[in-house]
Every structure is written in C-alpha cells, then in structure tokens.
Amino acid sequence: RKKAVQYHPDKNPGSKPAEEMFKKVSEAYEVLKDPEKRAAYDRFGHAAFAQAGGPRGPGGAGGGFHDPFDIFREVFGGAGGSIFEEFFGGGGGDGGRDGADLRYYMEITLEEAARGVEREIAIRKLTLCDHCEGAGAEPGSRRVTCTTCHGSGQVTTSRGFFTVRKVCPACHGAGRRIERPCRECRGEGRLQKTTKINVRIPPGVDTGSRLRSAGNGEAGLQGGRPGDLYLFIHVKDHEIFERQGDDLFCEIPIKFTLAALGGNIEVPTLSGKASLRIPPATQSGTTFRLKGRGVPALRSGQPGDQLVRVQVEVPTHLTAEQRKKLEEFALACGDANEPVARSFFEKAKKFF
C-alpha cells in the first residue's frame, strides 16, 4: 500500500516510470489478496507460479503467464520471493517438514506458583516410529525413483491458461519413494502415542503465563525438527490469600480487646506462620505489611510482600456479666477515647 501511494499517478503526473511501477504494484497486490494464489504459494512455493504458455482464456489475452514474484523483485528489491517468505513462511520444497507445536493447559495451586513445581504430564502426540526410526521404510528396504514424478519431485497440471507445478503427492517432493513401507506406521514415519514428559514450572508464574518446552511437540517428517510444547498456566483461587501481582493480600479477624490494648498475633503465610505486632488503638481496616512474604517475581526472583488487613470483631452472645462490664466500660469512656467519632459528629451537627 505504501508503494501504491508512492507511485500513484496523482502524485507523479506525467511520469511514465511511476505509472508502470504503479501497475506492477497493483498487480502484486492482486496476487497477495487472492486466497488461492496465496494458498498455492504456501503449499508449493515458487513452483506454483512458474512461467508457462497456455491457451487463450475467455475474455483474456493469449501468451505466457509471467511470474508475479518478478514484480516483488522489481518493486521491493531482494532476491525474489523474499517478501512472500517473510510474511507467509517458506514455500513447498524437498526438505523435511517440521512437527506441529502443541498446547497443554495446566492448573496449579498458589503454593506451587510461589515455590515452583515439577510435574509429569501425559500428552498424546505424533512421535517417531520406533520400528523404522522415522524413515517410513522397513529396515533393509531401499528407496526407488518415484514413478509419478519420475524423480523430479513435482507434477504439472493445467487449468485454463494456468500451468501449475506442485509437489508430487506420491513422494511429497522427495523424488524417491519407499520400496517397502514400514508395517507399523504405513510409511508415515510417525505414530500417535501417549508420551510422558517432565516439565518444570518456575517460581512466580501466574494465570496466563505461557511456558515453552522446546522440542516436546510433535515429531517432524523426513528430518524436520520437532515442534515445541507450550504450557498455559492457570493458578487456582486460594481460600485465604488473594494475589495482587507479586504481593499477597489477606484479612485477619482480631478481638476488640487486642485492637484496643495491642499485642502480638500469628498470621499464616505461604512459608509458615509469622508474628505480627498489633499496636494499641488499632482501628478496623488497618493494613500491615510483611516484607518478603509474597510471591517471587518470575524474572528477577525478588519476592513481593504480604499485606494483612485486620478486621476488629465485635463480640456476640454476651453473658449478663460480660454485658455489665461493657456497660461500665462505656460509662468510663469519654470523647478522648473516640477521636474519630467525636470529629465526625462535630461535622454532622448541622444535619441534626
């Protein structure tokens, strides 16, 4: 599109070279947007667009069909076809085919996410055939010239004024076929098998983390590299802790006498119990910080903190004696003991 704008006739009035270049860019765009032509390149590479003569089609001119990759060579520069290979991957060829990547969804606990864990997982995938070791041939069998493509690895078909070369379906472009296919995999070189894999989950992962296990995807064909296994992590909700990035958050109930008088309490952490000092006159909703008691960061390993918010619990089901003592306590309290309430009611006087 940028090239089309650059060479548009409105921007280059009277320029024949710009006009010619604009035509070529437009033609290249037609190739790009045509799903069949793009699919042909994905499957068969440059051979799908080889020059060939053809009969005059309906409403069209006769003669040869030029290679559209010449347009990309001239407009974008390079060694031909590189723009397609960059965006759509390499075309068909005689080499091996890489194995497919696989996904595996794993659920772990918050404790496992914080400490890291090793798991053995079982996945069903295409693996190299043990009998033929991926060759697809019976041991001792030899490869002979393919009778379909006569060793070229390609076959030619004609469609109207198109003549298309494509990878030979019999030998998959190798030019040779197996004399006696493997009896186990029927010449494929791979078999579906359930495989057990040990995977290590590092400390600090969170829901949505994606981990790559190189080479543990499906096996490749004819020497192609194996695919990779991608682990997608989901961390289960915890009954006490809520994760906030690398920090952990929890709420702890405390007695109203402890909130008034102060003291020490034990709070749970992922690494065991920890002592927390509650200062006198602590109000409900006050949050305290325990340094380094959170989850380690995935990259740096630096641990976060644990945030503890206290909720002052008001006693229920009072006995007669408890009620009497609380009433005596209430009579003994003055405004100085309740500064927040005193401040509020002073502001609210005008509403009464």
Image (cartoon, rainbow, N blue to C red):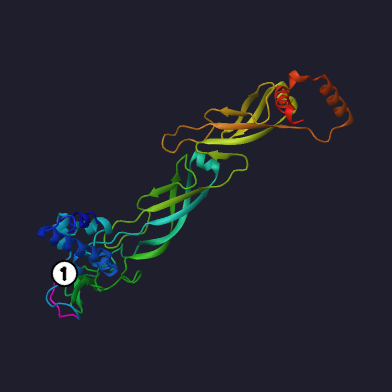
Q: Is residue 194 magenta?
A: no
Residue 10 relative to residue 311: left or right: left
Q: In the picture shown, does residue 64 fall above or below 341?
A: below
Residue 279: percent from left, percent from top = 66, 21
Which quarter of the figure has residue 299?
Answer: top left
Residue 177: percent from left, percent from top: 23, 72
Residue 56 is one of the magenta-drawn residues: yes
- Nearer to the camera, 197 or 214: 214
Residue 212 rendering spot, x and y as whole percentages: 39, 49
SS for tag 1? loop
- Tell me if residue 338 comes above or below residue 196 in the rendering: above
Which residue does the image show at 56% across and 32% down from the upper left? 306
Which residue is identified by label 1?
A: 50
Q: Residue at x 22, y 68 (%)?
A: 173
Q: Could you tell me which quadrant the C terminus lies in?
A: top right
Is 326 displayed left or right of 191 in the figure?
right
Q: Measuring 25% from the left and 63% from the top, which residue is drawn there?
A: 32
Left or right of residue 310, residue 90 in this image = left
Depth check, front residue: 19 or 104: 19
Query: Where residue 78 appears, x then y in whole percent?
Result: 15, 54
Please identify the dominant SS of the magenta region.
Answer: loop
Magenta-colored span:
51-57
